[in-house]
């Protein structure tokens, strides 16, 4: 049980920006942070990945890293069912991605392969398009059936993109990328990414370009061949009906559930039946999150995210600038 003296409140995090060869400058300008000399490709909004753990930026736990905090009271922070299922570890990694240039073509292993090869979780993920230049596109899945032999041949001769399903994107588009599905973000896209908390990525093809250190980036052709799902889907997009006022369930997967909340008036959000933490990403219009039981309040600026502990996942979402749009990620308690 958690100590009654402990205080649970929505957690904000210090900036956690990652420079990449394909990144841009939109994340620093959107967040009003100092510009970097090198391109910034990723903001790890909420992370418990050992290589880059989030540091709390507000309240009594300011300066504490997220993993240490969760370890104190895993059931209170993560939720009882989540803590049991994931052995007290944060199961999600949430990022913002700014692709100024093409990302490498990638695939992630599933849980079975990841456990067998590394003793880790695999990685399924989702993308929500925040903004996209006219004509911007990304790749998800194959556009026709191929086999491993053809895959390896096309990597060797640089024609792999000919068999990838290419999707033109607009703000609000959603893609679910289960482990094993080939994918790549194209240039001119800013998106939110929710994924299993894992850093396992197999780079299939990278347009033969050098990395940040000037050397060619490592490819993982054989491991990727084992991880790839060659099955072709008729439609790779996730369809949902957006609303200007209220909450919409966008995506429900075995690994996470994603809702989109848009409101111009205070909106009561009670997710306690799921017994799960909530990661709330503010995508438009600053808002306040006010916890019902404690009265604790945090100001969540556009372009920032917070983690709401499971024990306080009953709150009001209050727009500050007229209208707010918030993406929520949590682990649904499936009956």
Image (spheres, grey):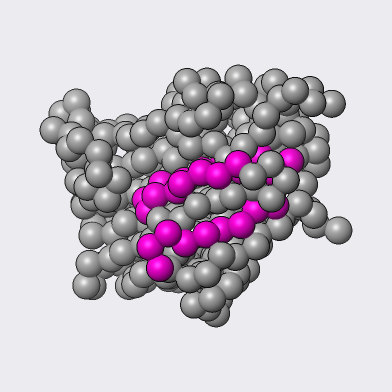
Say which residue appears at 20% left-offset and 31% top-offset: 212
Picture quadrant of residue 111: top right
Residue 51 shows in this picture: yes
* Residue 203 lies in the magenta-colored region: no
Say which residue appears at 45% left-offset and 48% top-offset: 300
Decide: is 94 above or below 181.
above
Picture quadrant of residue 249: bottom right
145 horizontally vs 81: left or right: left
Where, quadrant-wise, is the C terminus in this rendering? bottom right
Decide: is 181 above or below 172.
above
23 horizontally vs 47: left or right: left
Single out the residue that lies furthest toward the front.
295
Picture quadrant of residue 240: bottom right
Question: Residue 41 versus residue 10: which sits nearer the camera?
Answer: 10
**Residue 228 x %, y %:** 52, 51
Question: Residue 223 versus residue 3: which sits nearer the camera?
Answer: 3
303 horizontally vs 243: left or right: left
**Residue 62 x %, y %:** 49, 24
Question: Residue 159 versus residue 240: which sits nearer the camera?
Answer: 240
Decide: is 118 above or below 230.
above
| Highlighted range, magenta | 296-322
């Amino acid at each position: 049980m958690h100590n009654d003296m402990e205080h649970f409140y929505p957690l904000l995090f210090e900036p956690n920006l990652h420079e990449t060869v394909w990144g841009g400058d939109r994340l620093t300008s959107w967040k009003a942070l100092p510009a970097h000399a090198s391109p910034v490709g990723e903001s790890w909004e909420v992370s418990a990945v050992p290589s880059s753990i989030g540091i709390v930026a507000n309240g009594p736990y300011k300066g504490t890293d997220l993993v240490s905090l969760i370890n104190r009271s895993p059931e209170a922070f993560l939720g009882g069912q989540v803590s049991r299922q994931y052995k007290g570890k944060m199961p999600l990694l949430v990022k913002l991605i700014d692709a100024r240039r093409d990302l490498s073509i990638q695939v992630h292993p599933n849980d079975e392969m990841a456990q067998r090869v590394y003793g880790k979780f695999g990685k399924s993920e989702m993308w929500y398009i925040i903004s996209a230049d006219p004509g911007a596109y990304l790749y998800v899945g194959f556009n026709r059936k191929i086999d491993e032999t053809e895959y390896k041949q096309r990597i060797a001769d640089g024609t792999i993109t000919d068999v990838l399903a290419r999707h033109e994107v607009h703000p609000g588009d959603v893609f679910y990328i289960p482990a094993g599905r080939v994918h790549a973000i194209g240039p001119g896209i800013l998106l939110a990414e929710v994924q299993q908390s894992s850093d396992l990525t197999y780079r299939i093809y990278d347009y033969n370009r050098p990395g940040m250190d000037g050397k060619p980036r490592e490819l993982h052709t054989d491991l990727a061949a084992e991880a790839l799902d060659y099955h072709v889907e008729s439609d790779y997009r996730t369809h949902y009906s957006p609303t200007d006022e209220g909450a919409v369930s966008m995506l429900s997967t075995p690994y996470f559930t994603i809702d989109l909340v848009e409101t111009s008036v205070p909106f009561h959000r009670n997710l306690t039946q799921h017994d799960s933490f909530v990661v709330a990403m503010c995508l438009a219009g600053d808002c306040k999150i006010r916890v019902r039981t404690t009265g604790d309040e945090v100001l969540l600026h556009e372009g920032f995210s917070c983690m709401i502990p499971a024990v306080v996942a009953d709150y009001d979402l209050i727009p500050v600038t007229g209208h707010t749009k918030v993406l929520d990620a949590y682990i649904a308690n499936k009956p």
